[in-house]
Amino acid sequence: MAQRTVLKVDITCLKCKKKLLKAVTGLEGVDKIEVDAAKGTLTVTGNADPYDIIVRCRRAGKFAEVVTVGPPPAPTKPKEDEKKKQEEKKPVVQKDQLPYYMYQPHIIMMQPPCYEPNPSCSIM
């Protein structure tokens, strides 16, 4: 059964973050790893044992303190009201915004007139 383990780890730089990620990704049963440097948390989701995760963090030179261990949060489904709002936000194109060939089907192949300042041929 998958579980979510949240650890408090001191992450001061990008090198520390990479070193920690490399150490924890080698464990079996790890599905997802999230590192939040601002909060100083490492979140591991999967079947990995929390003790093994802590040992790997210690080997990487980081002290890890357990915040929570428990089931991962259930994925949230978008509500029907939000779906309706997204459908309503679709842009509505009015007739005068369309090009002339879109709303005049009998003039589909019409080319725009060519105006030359000095025509080479004139018909009288």
Image (spheres, rainbow, N blue to C red):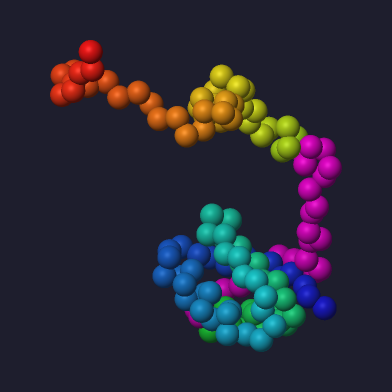
Q: Position of residue 99 (x, y in %)?
A: 50, 27
Q: Nearer the viewer, residue 117 or 27?
A: 117
70 lies left or right of 90: right
84 lies left or right of 120: right
59 lies left or right of 71: left
Look at 56% across and 28% down and name the residue there: 106
Residue 1, relative to residue 33: is it above or below? Answer: below
Q: Nearer the viewer, residue 82 or 65?
A: 82
Q: Quadrant of the N terminus?
A: bottom right
Q: Quadrant of the C terminus?
A: top left
Look at 30% across and 24% down and name the residue there: 114
Q: How many marks?
A: 0
* The quadrant where residue 104 appears: top right
Q: Nearer the viewer, residue 2 or 66?
A: 2
Look at 82% across and 44% down and name the residue there: 79
Q: Position of residue 73 (x, y in %)?
A: 79, 61
* The quadrant where residue 54 appears: bottom right
Residue 33, relative to residue 122: is it above or below? Answer: below
Look at 74% across and 69% down and name the residue there: 4
In the rendered structure, does residue 63 fall within the stretch colored magenta? yes
> Is residue 7 in view?
no
Start-end of magenta stretch: 60-84
> Is residue 5 in view?
yes
122 lies left or right of 51: left
